[in-house]
Image (tube, rainbow, N blue to C red):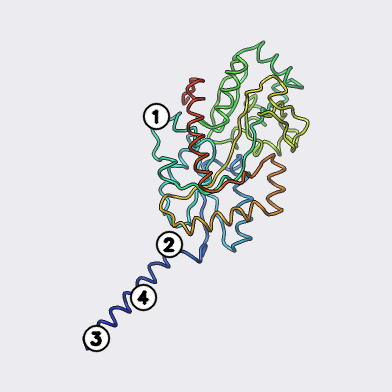
């Protein structure tokens, strides 16, 4: 009788352990067994969306499970960062952040999350150069030289929209002002999407935007590209001169987008996520979309991505200090 009871207890314990390890938060060889949610910390229509949504569609094709986009804009992407940091570490809640999140620690006096302590880096998804785009009806310049003549003639008259305080759009504008000795008023928005809509409508004069969100509007003639950051022209826009060509050899700003999971996400699940991302970005569909947006897929391991993120935090802290940038 006693032996039978002991054996029954052992079997029950084994069954309970098996059930526990099949639950989210433990080893999940079947991941994904349900839809995955991804926080995108900006409103729809911005640069992050330009890569997150095609990635989500390809993920669904590969796995048979939805990758649901949850747009949570505000405070230069830090509202979404806070929300994502509180997700369960089970592989079913992810965070599609960007370069902006490595700038934020130097801009905001207090954040409710720590990018390096509350998340684990998974993959650098896309890297695109910044581009100076203007509303052609408000900035009547056919080229960069004509644009600079207007800026020098009327300091403070013109403005630029950004995706918010502490975003790469903001820092790109301040760095441009620093290097060209011009004054342009900064107008922060809740994301690149709303800022772009106001640029197109003529409510703001210009943006220092990532090509990922501006590309379709440049091609459609709604906005005009005058210069792309860096030392080489972008293959997707070969007629747009690079910064080095127009006399700004040190003006190199890129907007990159990366994927994180909450700290504590099981290592095997992290590996599965990275595998699916790599498979998706290597597909013909996403290669074509990335190319049309002037983007590259940097081939980094998760560890290399983590090292890169740390180096970006250090780099942007120096830029913020040199430019004297503060949250407006």
What residue sits right under mark 1 in the picture? 109
Give the residue drawn at x 63%, y 54%: 280
**Considering only order in the chain, which callout, 1 or 3, is on the residue closer to the N terminus?**
3
Q: CA distance from mark 1 to mark 2?
A: 35 Å
Q: Residue furthest bottom?
A: 1
Q: CA distance from mark 1 to mark 4?
A: 50 Å
Circle 4 crowding by C-alpha within 10 Å: few under 14, some 14–19, many from 20: few
**Considering only order in the chain, which callout, 2 or 4, is on the residue closer to the N terminus?**
4
Circle 3 crowding by C-alpha within 10 Å: few under 14, some 14–19, many from 20: few
- Local secondary structure at mark 4: helix
Circle 1 crowding by C-alpha within 10 Å: few under 14, some 14–19, many from 20: few
Q: Residue furthest left?
A: 2
Q: Provide residue 205's location: percent of width, then percent of height.
A: 65, 24
What residue sits right under mark 2 in the picture? 24
- Local secondary structure at mark 2: loop
Q: CA distance from mark 3 to mark 4?
A: 18 Å
Give the residue drawn at x 47%, y 64%: 28
Q: CA distance from mark 4 to mark 2?
A: 16 Å
Give the residue drawn at x 74%, y 20%: 141
The dot on residue 15 is 4
Q: CA distance from mark 2 to mark 3?
A: 34 Å
- Local secondary structure at mark 3: helix
**Considering only order in the chain, which callout, 4 or 1, is on the residue closer to the N terminus?**
4
Contact (CB < 8 A) between labels 1 and 4? no
What residue sits right under mark 3 in the picture? 3
Q: Is residue 73 left or right of residue 207?
A: left
Contact (CB < 8 A) between labels 1 and 2? no
Contact (CB < 8 A) between labels 3 and 4? no
């Amino acid at each position: 009788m006693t032996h039978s009871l002991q054996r029954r207890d052992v079997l029950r314990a084994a069954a309970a352990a098996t059930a526990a390890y099949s639950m989210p938060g433990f080893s999940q060889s079947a991941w994904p067994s349900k839809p995955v949610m991804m926080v995108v910390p900006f409103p729809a229509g911005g640069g992050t969306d330009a890569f997150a949504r095609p990635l989500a569609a390809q993920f669904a094709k590969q796995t048979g499970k939805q990758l649901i986009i949850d747009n949570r804009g505000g405070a230069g992407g830090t509202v979404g960062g806070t929300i994502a940091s509180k997700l369960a570490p089970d592989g079913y809640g992810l965070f599609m952040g960007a370069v902006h999140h490595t700038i934020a620690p130097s801009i905001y006096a207090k954040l409710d999350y720590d990018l390096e302590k509350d998340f684990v880096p998974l993959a650098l998804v896309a890297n695109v150069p910044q581009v100076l785009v203007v509303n052609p009806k408000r900035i009547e310049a056919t080229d960069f030289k004509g644009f600079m003549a207007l800026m020098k003639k009327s300091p403070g008259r013109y403005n630029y929209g950004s995706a918010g305080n502490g975003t790469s759009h903001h820092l790109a504008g301040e760095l441009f002002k620093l290097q060209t000795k011009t004054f342009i008023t900064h107008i922060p928005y809740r994301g690149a999407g709303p800022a772009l809509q106001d640029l197109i409508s003529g409510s703001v004069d210009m943006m220092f935007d990532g090509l990922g969100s501006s590309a379709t509007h440049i091609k459609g003639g709604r906005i005009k590209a005058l210069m792309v950051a860096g030392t080489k022209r972008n293959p997707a826009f070969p007629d747009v001169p690079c910064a080095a060509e127009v006399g700004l050899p040190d003006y190199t700003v890129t907007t990159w987008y990366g994927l994180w999971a909450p700290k504590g996400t099981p290592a095997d699940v992290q590996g599965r996520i990275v595998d699916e991302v790599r498979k998706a970005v290597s597909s013909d569909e996403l290669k074509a979309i990335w190319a049309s947006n002037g983007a590259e897929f940097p081939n980094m391991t998760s560890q290399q991505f983590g090292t890169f993120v740390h180096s970006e935090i250090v780099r942007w802290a120096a830029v913020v200090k040199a430019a004297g940038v503060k949250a407006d």
